[in-house]
Amino acid sequence: MRHGRLALVSFCIAIAAAAARADETCQSPYLPKITGQEDFLYVWTLGIDGVGDGSDKLVTLGANPAKTGYGKVVSSVSVGGRHEAHHGGFTDDRRQLWMGGLDDSLIFVFDVASDPAHPKLVKTIEDFVAKSGGAVGPHTFYALPGRMLISALSNATDGGGKTALVEYNNQGEWIRTIWMPDGAEYGYDVRVNADLNRMLTSSFTGKNNYMRPLADLMGDAEAMKRFGNTVVVWDFHTRKPLQTLAVPGAPLEIRWALQPNHHYAFTSSALTAKIWSVLRKDDGTFEAVEIGTVGDPAKIPLPVDISLSADDRHLFVSSFNDGTARVFDVSNPRKAVQVYEKKIGKQLNMVSQSWDGKRVYFTSSLLANWDKSGEDGEQFLRAFDWDGKALAKRFEIDFKAEKLGRPHIMNFGSEDFYHGKVAVAGGAE
């Protein structure tokens, strides 16, 4: 009987582990994973003057073909005004979704646990600039135990690229600010490898640049010099910088490898259209290695987002200017080999891939003043199946036709995750 019980326990654990492989691959290791097919996509959307109410909003889309509302708008919550909606993320208990505005640095906190189909705006954090000591432009929201780690893009003194990492607790109270080190003052993304006790940060540009029209910016030679060219390696526990690595051309999103003993991460440089590995060496230090090219750099495809498959084999790279998604085989982390590409739209930004590798989602908007205009200014979410060889469209939402604005970052949601778990244990609000 004892052996039978052990076999049953092992079987249940294996089934649970298999079921858990549905969440996004890019999430914090401190974030519990949703199980099974995702039910919703939470899309943080920039308002457009004269389109709908003109305000930024959190839009909930149905993503589960077995449930009503599939491929349609389920709900939306306007936050009033346009704040340059950009990125956001869950708290470590997945009860709240924090979403930021790059222009005025407001942070909007949504309760997604009480009714996952209809998130509610429960708090607006208005003191980010004052409490952080002058950091501006909250970008990446990264769940830590009981805390939210936020990378900023700029500062309130000169609107340049000198910036910081800022920590809040889950109650919305500021804890501390860690300014970027000398020689690597720019910031963008932040990602943690808990097993290695290492954190990586990347670099972009300051508010004076990212709030400026793209054509105007690219015509200003002096302004184009004010982009970051570094990735910083940190001791995560002490939050101390250990190394500054040269990665020219504004390295943006960072994705750590997900498999055990894969001690490396990937990023792409927007301005030079290169893919980079950040690899741990035998002595414990890291090196940055250029491993591939995205399209024709002379045509400035502008790679802006990446998504790594759970088996660390395929890296999806979306590029804004040519509207194209490319897939690279990165099973050898020192050499990226392109194996597929598909034109997704006339402009393209975010890409989110499910942990089981079967579904990939794309959105179109980059920044309000950088998006294309006229017929080229499509605003969409497009969902695809991925069989390891090609993308096949599932559904799409035209955000302009729905009067919802410009869709940017996506987060996955699930009803079953909260049943008998967070919503009950924590008490629904």
Image (tube, rainbow, N blue to C red):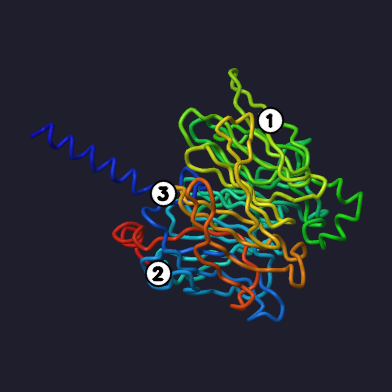
Find numbered disc 1 in the image and state the secondary structure of the residue it sits on: strand
Q: Quadrant of residue 427?
A: bottom left
Is label 1 in contact with label 2 (beta carbons under 8 Å)? no
1 or 2: mark nearer the eye: 1
**Distance from the alpha carbon under mark 3 to that under mark 2:** 18 Å
Residue 265 lies, in percent from the top left, at 59, 35
Name the residue that disc number 3 marks. 32
> Which residue is more in the foreground, 173 or 16?
16
Q: Amino acid at mark 3?
A: Pro
Residue shown at 55% from the left, 64% from the top: 43
Q: Earlier in the sequence, mark 3 or mark 2?
A: 3
Residue 80 lies, in percent from the top left, at 63, 76
Name the residue that disc number 1 marks. 288
Q: Earlier in the sequence, mark 1 or mark 3?
A: 3
Residue 422 lies, in percent from the top left, at 35, 58
Badge 2 density bin: few <14, some 14–19, many ≥20, Cα 10 Å: some
> Which residue is more in the foreground, 424 or 324?
324
Q: Is residue 38 toward the left or the right of residue 255 in the image?
A: left
From the viewer's perspective, is residue 109 above or below residue 24? below
Residue shown at 69% from the left, 30% from the top: 289
Find numbered disc 2 in the image and state the secondary structure of the residue it sits on: loop
**Distance from the alpha carbon under mark 1 to that under mark 3:** 30 Å
Q: Quadrant of residue 99?
A: bottom right
Name the residue that disc number 2 marks. 115
> Which residue is more in the foreground, 238 or 38?
38
